[in-house]
Image (cartoon, rainbow, N blue to C red):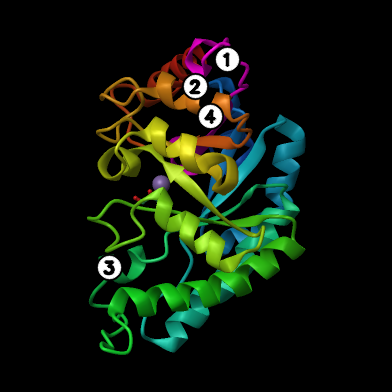
Amino acid sequence: MTAWHDREMTMELKLSAREYLSRGDGYEEKMEYLMAAGYDAIELTGRPDILEMVDEIAEAMRNTGCAVSTICSGGRGALMAAERDQRELAVEDLRNFLTAAGQLGATGVIYAPLIAVKMNPDQYTRLPDLSPWKGQEELEMDLLVELATELAEHAESQGVCVLWEPLNRYEQWWFNRLENGAELCDRVGRDGCRIMADFFHMSIEEDTIAGALERYAADYVRHIHLADSNRFTPGHGHTDFAAAFRALDGIGWEGYMALECRTRGEAAEDIARTARLLRSQA
Ligand code: LER
Ligand code: MN
């Protein structure tokens, strides 16, 4: 029997890139730029104004053949803040981004649950430690399950999912590894609740990227962010992309992978080189 690492790879890479890596006035030019560099899709930045631009984005997709893989949420408020009005704002924006994602045929909307509160301590308050009833993380997880269940229901009605993103320990107190995301999905128990895997955060938090993907990707991971270990474009650090892609190929993974990193040298050349390198590893 052939071991998975000895097989020919059959995975077709569906490459996307964050909107900030593209250039151009308007979505048609941004999409043309990415397509010319070797990408199939764009990952939109979730600013409230994109909700007014859904028709323009859909027309740009038709005219260029470029897909929208995902919306990376940057909405208002903070989902896990102690301030109720800030949680409600975050829920409202997430629901609207999920509706837009459905209209654009995207996989879903990305949200890192704790980043806003951790990174903006002057703006938001973290939930309290209510020990011995519930510790801080336990309370946060219970609230997250509640909100993720409500959001998954709306996501499913739009044919998309919420893609919860584990981040490294310096950006999020917990929810750092794919196993945290898998636990959330199991507790929510709905198809609209899934996770995404960011290779930069994984290079800090997981034992190996390939091992974590082998274990969790088939059931839970629906999207990927690509960056090398130093968060530059692939090829500039020590991440083993070929091993990670073999793990994904072994489970027949089919989602989009979006480049989310910094470039080196001339940006247009670097992102085109990156697409060629990634395709040669798959
Ligand atoms: C933040 O480090 C990150 O990886 C983004 O995808 C957050 O949404
Ligand atoms: Mn990311």
Residue 82 in sight: yes
Q: State the mark number for residue 170.
A: none
Q: How far apart in space, not on screen, are marks 2 and 3 (Cα)?
A: 35 Å
Residue at 27% x, 57% y is 171
Q: State the mark number for residue 9.
A: 1
Q: In the rendered image, which residue does mark 4 sit on?
A: 248
- The kind of residue on which mark 4 rests is Leu
Which of disc 4 and disc 1 is earlier in sequence? 1
Occupied quadrant, residue 165: bottom left
Q: Nearer the viewer, residue 97 or 238?
A: 238
Which of disc 4 and disc 3 is earlier in sequence? 3
- Whether the residues at callouts 2 and 3 have beta carbons within 8 Å, the answer is no
Q: Secondary structure at mark 3?
A: helix
Which of disc 2 and disc 1 is earlier in sequence? 1
- The kind of residue on which mark 2 rests is Arg
- Whether the residues at callouts 1 and 2 have beta carbons within 8 Å, the answer is yes
In front: mark 3 or mark 1? Answer: 1
In front: mark 3 or mark 4? Answer: 4
Q: How far apart in space, not on screen, are marks 1 and 4 (Cα)?
A: 10 Å
- The kind of residue on which mark 1 rests is Met
Q: How far apart in space, not on screen, are marks 3 and 1 (Cα)?
A: 40 Å
Mark 4 is surrounded, within 10 Å at the Cα level, by few (under 14), some (14 to 19) or many (20 or more) other residues, namely many
Q: Secondary structure at mark 1?
A: loop
Q: In the rendered image, which residue does mark 3 sit on?
A: 118
Residue 16 belongs to the span the image colors magenta? yes
Mark 3 is surrounded, within 10 Å at the Cα level, by few (under 14), some (14 to 19) or many (20 or more) other residues, namely many
Q: Is the residue at mark 3 in contact range of ligand 1, meaning its CB lies under 8 Å from it?
A: no
Where residue 248 sits in the image (x, y, percent)?
53, 29
Name above or below for residue 126 compared with residue 7.
below
Q: Is the residue at mark 2 in contact range of ligand 2, meaning its CB lies under 8 Å from it?
A: no
Q: State the mark number for residue 246.
A: 2
Which of disc 3 and disc 2 is earlier in sequence? 3
